[in-house]
Amino acid sequence: MIFHTGSGPRSLCILRLSAMGDICHMLPIVRSLQHAWPETKLSWVIGKLEHSLVGDIPGIEFIIFDKAKGFSAYPQLYQQLRGRRFDVLLHMQMSLRASIASLLIPAQIKLGFDRKRAHDLQWLFTNQQIPYKQKQHVVDSFFGFIETLGIHERVMEWDIPIDELTREQVKSLLPETPYVVISPCSSMAYRNWTVEGYAAAADHIHAEYGKTVVLTGGPSAIEKEYAENISARCRHKPINLIGKTSLKELLAIIDEAEVVIAPDSGPAHMATAVNTPVIGLYACTNPDRARPYLSAELVISHYPEAVRDKFSKSVDEVPWGTRVRDPGTMERIKVEEVIHMLQHFYA
């Protein structure tokens, strides 16, 4: 199955529908594929929302799988791929939804995760698997797919296009002076830090560094509530843009920020994609697996203590990727730690 650099397969399809952070993690793999095999026709089966962020990357045929349509998304995918056949399918999502979709993607080689990591029975839907490797960051595990195909040069570029119109549109929403983004919420609420903590950090940023804080995030009810409560507790009110931007506009805002403060979430990884440093807040998930890839030195982690108290084991003794979902876990992170990390960043 090994191909040679410069003479890869004629066609290759990537199956990765979501989530936003993992879509960002995918981009260096895509860039490495494009660099090594410029003649290979690349297709990517992707979720509709995720497509709105990366769908204008050149050199890729995007095939949208609209998860919101439920079962009817499958016959639509079948119609889009009718009569097609790929040399290789990279089945890079461990979910039953994605595996069922993989049945509608004809390919000679269907490459998936090794059986030890192939959750949700993914191994039943592939005919070849990548080698097992222990304790990898998600990005490194994704690189295992193209390494199995014979590509070992990593192109660590993300390069999500942001057009000038989008940049101009967000300028009217932002301060003219340098600013800090706080993206307070994850799609998994148990990962969110406290409202009080964010408000105290925002006040410190203004008082100590004279920076405006911009709150960013999606339109969900919990995110809007977080924004209102954080603003209510701040002496110097942040600019609240939660629920008021598209994904591209959010990316443009993050791109111009000096630093982002966020839990394990899509915006934290969007920041990596535009090379904006991230102060990552981790207690529920393992930062060695899921931290912002380029900001290891800015991570605040209480994950080892959370695992010890929950399971009476060390991180090395629990399965890789174990999560601690107990209420109050993120409260282990103290305001003083965030202030100290800001001092480190601005030193």
Image (tube, rainbow, N blue to C red):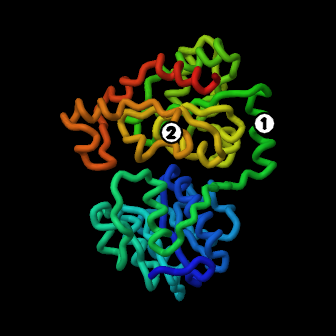
Residue at the (52%, 83%) spot, across then down: 86
| Residue 211, image x, y percentages | 69, 21
Between discs 1 and 2, the one toward the N terminus = 1
Distance of mark 1 from mark 2, alpha carbons?
A: 30 Å
In the image, is 312 to the left or to the right of 45? left
Instruction: For the C terminus, give its image quadrant.
Output: top right
Look at the numbered disc 1 and give the secondary structure of its residue: helix
| Count of number-bearing discs | 2
Look at the numbered disc 2 and give the secondary structure of its residue: helix
Eyeballing the image, is 259 above or below 88?
above
Q: Mark 1 vs mark 2: give the one in front.
A: 2
Q: Is residue 196 visible?
A: no
| Mark linked to residue 296 | 2
| Residue 253, image x, y percentages | 69, 38
Residue at the (41%, 66%) spot, across then down: 98
Q: Is residue 101 visible?
A: yes
Residue at the (54%, 32%) spot, across then down: 279
Residue at the (65%, 69%) spot, across then down: 35
In the image, is 29 to the left or to the right of 171? left
The quarter of the displayed image where residue 29 is located: bottom right
Identity of the amino acid at label 2? Ala
The front one of 134 and 265 is 134
| Residue 56, image x, y percentages | 69, 61
| Residue 280, image x, y percentages | 50, 34
| Mark linked to residue 258 | none
Identity of the amino acid at label 1? Lys
Instruction: For the N terminus, give its image quadrant.
Output: bottom left
The quarter of the displayed image where residue 193 is located: top left
| Mark linked to residue 171 | 1
Circle 1 Cα neighbour tier, 10 Å, few/some/many (<14 / 14–19 / ≥20): some
